[in-house]
Every structure is written in C-alpha cells, then in structure tokens.
Amino acid sequence: MAMFGAVGTLGSLTASGARGIMHADSNLNLAAMANQSEDTGVLTSHVLHKSAAKALKSAANRQKQQDDSIVYCTRNGSEITKRAITSISMFQKRQPPGSIDVWWLYDDGGLTILLPYILSTRSSWSDCKLRIFALANRQQEMELEERNMANLLSKFRIDYSSLHMVQDITAEPKPESQQLFDSLLNGFRESEREDDDDECYVSDTEMATLHEKSNRQMRLRELLQEHSSEANLIIMSLPMPRKGTVSAPLYMAWLEVLTRDMPPFLLVRGNQTSVLTFYS
C-alpha cells in the first residue's frame, strides 16, 4: 500500500553549521558537520537469516492468498477482500512492534525527519523504533559522514534507534528492477504513440537524458527491499525534478518503482521552509 504525500513545508537548513547539507537532487552532503557518533556492528549468520527470511516470506504469501480469498459485500453489492479492509483500517489501531524507516535523501528543511519523529511519540506508534537512512556521498568517507549525521540529529534533538549510511546508489540496477521499470512504460514510449499528445509519451531522448536518474530510483527500490521490506511505515523524501524536465509517465514510473509491493509508504516534499531548530 502506498501513500503519496507532498506535505507541509520544507526548506534549507539556515542555522550555522547546517550549510553543509545542500540540495542537488542527489545525496546529503555532511562534510562540514564532523563530530562524534558511535560505531556499531552486528554479526549475524547469513545462512540462518536467509532461511528465516524465506520462511517468513512464504508464510506472508500464504496469508495474503487466504485474505484475498475472503470476500465481503458492501450494501450496493460491491465486493471487497479482507486484505483491503485490513489495509484501510490499519492506521486506526495500535501498531505492532516494528519500525518507522526514514529515508532522508535531500536537504529538505527537516520535515522528512520531523514528521516520523512526531509520529513515533504517539501512543499508537510507541512500539515502533525510528530508523534513519541516508545516502553516503563517498565510500571512503562513510564513517565520517555517519558521525556528521549523528551529530546533526543530536543538535535537532531527534531520538532515533539506529542510523544507516547507505552506499552503492550509483551501481547498475538488477535485471528484474529494469524489467519492472520497462513494463511500467509499456504503451508510453515514443515508438508506440498513437496521437500527438507529447505529454503522454516518453521520448527516446528523454530516456537517454534521464537514464542515471531512472537508475537511481531502481537502485533505491533495491535498497528499500534490502533494508525496509518489513517496516511498519516508510517515509522518504519525494523525488522532485525541475519543472518541465520529466514527462508525467516517466515521473509516475519512478514513484511506482519506489513504492510497489512495499509497506505503507509516505513521500514528503515541501517548499523549502526550515522546520527544525538547533539546540544550543
């Protein structure tokens, strides 16, 4: 289930010491924010983890099929599955123990961080840990950037359970991710056009020009599957290209790639007004 939200107002961090975070439609830049944080490491058995994950996925698929087979009828005769009813009402009850995963990808004034933090303080979400993910600019400086980010969150008084600096965002996406992306654009490619409405088609030139950005969304999907597939809620910075640079079908394909078959998903973007203040 996916929820798209362009919520509230966001903006540049104007407090002193936060100018190192710059929006460039890419990663957070934390080079100017060096300070302390703790290094943690977790050693797990890959074999046991893989086996347990496979068993959980199989059980979830069986439950999904069972819920889809149970059908209720509304007053006007329309049919609705048990899974759909559960999805509609899931935020009306207390959340089970789990996590709220925050993917803070851009300098957005802090709303992408503030919203989940406020949510985590509510009683219905009190059993959910706040996990924060950010993209590392350089693999060689990942440890430094993690310390910078931890220091920044401390200044903002954001209470979180874990911080992960994610790398390899520029790697080539897997074939299955590319196949999903291509399938979303079926019928919208320039070679398949049946009328003269340019806004409803993706040209070959546009595909070539935005190839790296498309790959980025596919890689983000793979990272989401790796780290956040079991989260109670995912909150992520909404990818927002400059006006007129991307067609509607391509942009919607990006959003679909990010959110398809994911946990409940909230995409956040605003108009660059800072919502966080430093503690001094």
Image (cartoon, rainbow, N blue to C red):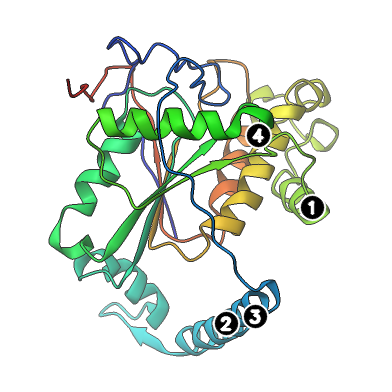
Can the viewer see residue 179 in this picture?
Answer: yes
Residue drawn at point x = 56 percent, y = 88 percent: 62
Quadrant holding the C terminus: top left
Residue drawn at point x = 52 percent, y = 29 percent: 145
Residues at circles 2 and 4 in contact by the CB criterion of under 8 Å: no
In the rendered image, which residue does mark 2 sit on?
Answer: 61
- Residue 247 placement, left or right of 235: right
- Residue 137 placement, left or right of 132: right
Residue drawn at point x = 30 percent, y = 10 percent: 14
In the rendered image, which residue does mark 1 sit on?
Answer: 179
Labels 2, 3: front one: 3
Q: Is residue 37 above or below residue 212?
A: below
> Percent x, y for residue 124?
18, 64
**Identity of the amino acid at label 4?**
Leu
Checking the image for residue 250, the label placed there is 4
Of helix, strand and loop, which one carries label 3?
helix
Which of 171/61 is in front? 171
Residue at mark 2 to residue at mark 3: CA–CA distance:
20 Å
Residue at mark 2 to residue at mark 1: CA–CA distance:
22 Å
Q: Is residue 164 above or below residue 19?
A: below
Comes first in the chain, label 2 or label 3? 3
In the rendered image, which residue does mark 3 sit on?
Answer: 48
Q: Residue placed farthest to the left in the image?
A: 123
